[in-house]
Amino acid sequence: MTEQVLQLMRLYAKQYNVPVLFDETSEFICSYIKEHDVKSVLEIGTAIAFSTIQFACAKEDVHVTSIEIDVNRYCTAQKNVFMAGLADRITLLHDNALTCDLKNQKFDLIFIDAAKSQYLHFFERYKDNLNEGGVIVSDNLFFHGMVEDLSLTHNYSTKKLVKKIRKYVLFLKSNTEFDTEFFNCGDGISVSRRHS
């Protein structure tokens, strides 16, 4: 049943131009969830809950909390979670991730896949919501190859966004509190773990 729901979601995403996780990225994160016995995930940026559902299906004992600011996407995500039969293992929050208050909740994995220009703010806001040994995974760090080669775009707004992603990557590389590994997977991802 879940695979049928995901297939319908793929078609919906294509038809309505909703960005969803690359299969390669999803497989990487789902494997990480299984291999590291992740029990709790915070996802920043639900969209239509495509990746949310995949993460919840990675293991039977994982719970996913996901934040979405857009009301239409949030409502679509709710329907998709219900259709997939995962309402008991997924908590959807309609909120702004920059102001959402989750200070008392802890997670084994935090996945950042929302407004690219705000990645640094998301990282700083939620790093203290990590359980000991937990990780922060950030997606889209290549941004279609533009982070490495800015000449791939001539659009001013896109260049500005790419520069913010570059700044975030430099922040991760120079962060003394976390060790970060970068992976050539999908559109580029990082896994950041706090020093023990």
Image (spheres, rainbow, N blue to C red):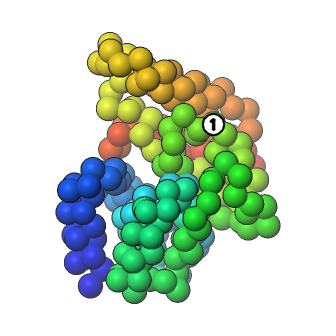
As drawn, 175 above or below 27: above
* Residue for point 48% across, 49% down: 113
Q: In this view of the protein, can residue 177 be seen by the observer?
A: yes
As drawn, 163 above or below 101: above
As drawn, 110 above or below 54: above
As drawn, 150 above or below 170: above
* Residue for point 32% across, 19% down: 153
Q: Position of residue 15 (x, y in %)?
A: 20, 56
Label 1 CA crowd tier, 10 Å (few <14, some 14–19, many 20+): some
Question: Which sits in the foreground, 185 or 52?
Answer: 52
Q: Is residue 26 left or right of residue 35?
A: left
Q: How many marks?
A: 1
* Residue for point 79% across, 67% down: 104
Q: Position of residue 52 (x, y in %)?
A: 44, 66
Quadrant position of residue 132: bottom right
The residue labelled by disc 1 is 120
Residue lying at the far front in this picture: please name it. 72
Q: What amino acid is at disc 1?
A: Leu
Q: In this view of the protein, can residue 31 be seen by the observer?
A: no
* Residue for point 63% across, 36% down: 120
Q: Position of residue 136 (x, y in %)?
A: 59, 50
